[in-house]
Image (cartoon, helix red, strand yellow):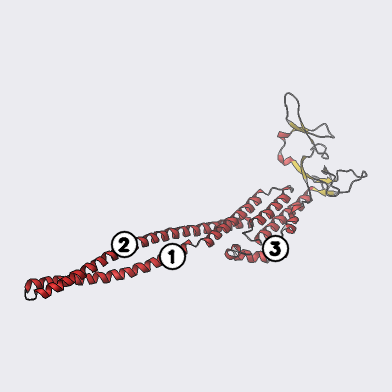
Amino acid sequence: MKGLWSEHFPAAASASASRVDISPTKTNGNWSERLSAFASPPHQYQRCLLCPVCNASICRLKTSNTLKNPDRQFYNCPTSDNFFKWADEVNPNQLIDVPNCGGCSAGACRVRRETIGPNAGRILFMCRVKEGEGSCGYRVWQDELEMSTSSQSTNNCDDLLTLLETMDVKDHVAMRQAAEATFTAMDHLPFGHQDFKNCVNELIHCASSLSEIEQSMHTNDSYQRLVEHCSRERTRLEEINCVHAETTYTVTNKKKHLKDLHKEISSTLDWLFRIEAELSCFDVEMRDIELGMEQISRDKEELEGKYSIAFKELEETKKLFERKEAEFDAAKAAYYRARALLRG
């Protein structure tokens, strides 16, 4: 198996590989030869009522035209006038599936229920052409035919399951074609297979969902870009915080020094001119530093805003990624349950 199936279900992949090798590489990527095995059922069947009186004729289904029962269908025996029954009163279990002749394909077989001897109660299907008039000699007991068709139905199910397990889950079209070909063949068998069909459809649906989620996870790189962007903004913020701390320390020291100078001016007039000159210089320097600090503060606020936005985007993307992982886990669990139900 390739892709997601083999990555997340290695046990299923190894099991399917040990059964039958029908991979596309051995058919040049064409599944038509494999699907043809499902496409041609051996028999066609007709739902009929065997006359319970003569046990040798298929009842005719007719429609009443009487005023009392208009358009009401009924069964009657073509060879005996002693049997009549309304179609809506017939128990479905009384109906049998009569196959077309498997020897000459002349149409629906003749039917006879044995009433005596070791085969009493068994139903025999025979070529509809009577013996001596060109009959192909086809004869088969109903129970033997049912066992044969039951075995064929089981083989079709096993073959389809093996085929699906060896296919790439991303190739939904081929999986659907394989399933529909098998369903078409099984529709001609006298057995219901709706539960099997539902399980197969659920398997294909889960495989499709699993593939879509995997593809969306592989193509979504916005999360990584936001992580890198957030990391760069955080580095710049740390750098500006360092500059801001150094500037704050410098301003604090300058203010303290200025305060000391004012005290010295008030305490000594002898040094007035020198102190006034020094004070003037410090005033100018202080204005420049304060202007620089204001600019640094504005830059700091701007970077803090950018970092906050980047951090929110990172959180949202992280939540989205976690939801994707949850969807993937749910799809994987649904697929595994569907596969377990199919195998069970």
- Is residue 169 shown above or below 262? above
Element class at badge 1: helix
The C terminus lies in quadrant = bottom right
Label 3: how many residues lie within 10 Å, few (<14), some (14-19) or many (20+)? Answer: some
Element class at badge 2: helix
Could you say which disc has been placed on residue 24 in the image?
Answer: 3
| Percent position of residue 25, x then y | 70, 65
- Is residue 119 shown above or below 245? above
- Relative placement, left or right, of 72 versus 293 is right
- Relative placement, left or right, of 63 versus 336 is right
Element class at badge 3: helix
Q: Nearer the viewer, residue 199 or 33?
A: 33
* Viewer-side label of 2, 1: 2
Residue identifier under label 2: 301
Could you say which disc has been placed on residue 227 in the image?
Answer: 1
Marks 3 & 2, CB-CB < 8 Å contact: no
Which image quadrant for residue 175? Answer: bottom right
Q: Amino acid at mark 2?
A: Glu
- Is residue 315 shown above or below 241? above
The N terminus lies in quadrant = bottom right
* Viewer-side label of 3, 1: 1
Which image quadrant for residue 56? Answer: top right
Q: Amino acid at mark 3?
A: Pro
Q: Calculate the distance from the C-alpha at mark 3 to the C-alpha at mark 2.
A: 62 Å
Q: Nearer the viewer, residue 27 or 234?
A: 234
| Percent position of residue 226, x then y | 44, 63
Instruction: Give the mark nearest the N terminus, 3 or 2.
Output: 3
Outermost residue, right direction? Answer: 132
